[in-house]
Amino acid sequence: MQNEFLKRFLSSIILFPISFFIIFKNSYFFNLFIILLFLTSSYEWYHMTRKKYYQSIGFIFLLISFSSAFFLRNIFSDNEGLFYFLLVFLTCILSDIGGYIFGKIFKGPKLIKISPKKTISGSFGSYLLSIFFFYFVFQIHSIATFKEENYNLDFNIYFIIILLCTVSQIGDLIISFFKRISNINDTGKIIPGHGGILDRIDGMIFAIPSFYLLLCVYNFF
């Protein structure tokens, strides 16, 4: 267990700075990154759902999801695109971390049979960590810039964070369901301690298109 946690921790230390650099840098780095993630995720999905009737539906969904990621980062101004993308990216990561930490510490009743490691306390921790993180970030930003409000920090931002946490957790459970019926523990082995790319971004591939659609339909900021 400790060895697995160490692998997960070290992988995260390496992946996070690289991911942030690519997101901030944008341009060809980001586009190439999105293409590589799409191809790798599609490869993992192919091997997980061989000859299944829903395989093609998964490919279409992945294409929509990664296209949404591209447009979310590029269709708006650079600062807006960066803010929107980081909002989704960080919320999904914090949701995952909060669920993992709270689940390990408090344990308690299981959330659902599809994913036996998920607990109700972990689900609560996902929301709590995400909300508190952004609350403190925006408070610090307000003080540093001498502004009382940033990005309309009211009910809208908290609604978005809660929505993204919910969708991220649902995405995690959906991928867990497909892994379960495919009799596999991980979608791949490319990331030590995490498994495959789909294991790492299972929540994001659902949260990003949901947020992008919401952003196109409603003007929340």
Image (spheres, grey):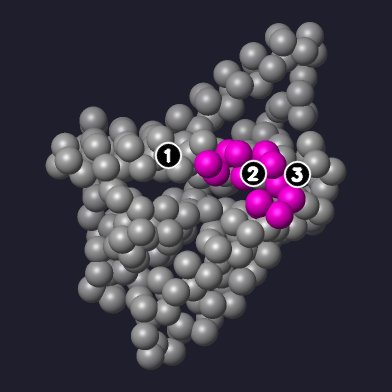
**Residue type at the position of mark 1:** Ile
Q: Which residue is mark 3?
A: 81
Residue 158, x across and y down, in percent = 62, 33
In contact (CB < 8 Å): disc 1 and disc 2? no
Q: Which residue is mark 2?
A: 23
Q: Quadrant of residue 105?
A: top left
Q: CA distance from mark 1 to mark 2?
A: 15 Å
Q: Quadrant of residue 108?
A: top left
**Residue type at the position of mark 2:** Ile
Q: Which residue is mark 1?
A: 14
Q: Nearer the viewer, residue 208 or 14?
A: 14
Q: CA distance from mark 3 to mark 1?
A: 24 Å
Residue 93, x across and y down, in percent = 47, 41
Whichever of callouts 1 and 2 sits on the residue coming sooner in the sequence is 1
Q: Specify whether residue 211 is painted magenta.
A: no
Q: Specify whether residue 21 is painted magenta.
A: yes
- Residue stretch rendered in magenta on the structure: 18-30
Circle 2: element type? helix
